[in-house]
Amino acid sequence: MVIEKINCSKCIYYYITWDPAFPKGCKLYGFKSPNLPSILVKQSSGIACGKFTPKERK
């Protein structure tokens, strides 16, 4: 079984916040975190983020 790390910075829901304590956010789940949102989702639910949607390249 191959476990892939989710790169939140390539997801359409990822954003950088203005809060220095919580600089990374997820628009879909509606939270900010000091770590990548996918890490928090994995820690909270026990499963990898299933809503990752890659950004479109122009």
Image (cartoon, rainbow, N blue to C red):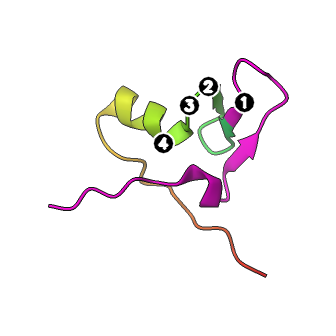
Task: Farthest residue to the top: give it.
Answer: 21
Q: Which residue is mark 4?
A: 38
Looking at the image, residue 40 sits to the left or right of residue 28; the answer is: left
Tell me how far mark 3 sits from mark 4, CA to CA.
8 Å
Q: Secondary structure at mark 3?
A: loop
**Which amino acid, mark 2?**
Pro
Looking at the image, residue 34 sits to the left or right of residue 58; the answer is: left
Looking at the rendering, the stretch of residues picked out in magenta corresponds to: 1-24
Residue 33 or 51: which is nearer the viewer? 33
Please, what is the dominant secondary structure of the magenta stretch?
loop
**Which amino acid, mark 1?**
Pro
Q: Which residue is mark 2?
A: 34
Question: Sequence-wise, which precedes: disc 1 or disc 3?
Answer: 1
Q: Secondary structure at mark 1?
A: loop
**Which amino acid, mark 3?**
Asn
Question: Sequence-wise, which precedes: disc 4 or disc 1?
Answer: 1
- Which tag is nearer the camera, tag 4 or tag 2? 2
Q: Which residue is mark 3?
A: 35
- Relative vertical location of residue 6 with respect to residue 15 in this rendering, above or below: below
- Relative vertical location of residue 19 with respect to residue 3 in this rendering, above or below: above
**Which amino acid, mark 4?**
Ser
Q: Are marks 2 and 3 in contact (CB under 8 Å)?
A: yes
Q: Are marks 3 and 4 in contact (CB under 8 Å)?
A: no
Tell me how far mark 2 sits from mark 3, CA to CA.
4 Å
Looking at the image, residue 18 sits to the left or right of residue 53; the answer is: right
Location of the C terminus (image quadrant):
bottom right
Q: Which residue is mark 1?
A: 23
Q: Secondary structure at mark 4?
A: helix
Q: Position of residue 3 (x, y in %)?
A: 26, 56
Q: Secondary structure at mark 2?
A: loop
Q: Are marks 1 and 2 in contact (CB under 8 Å)?
A: yes
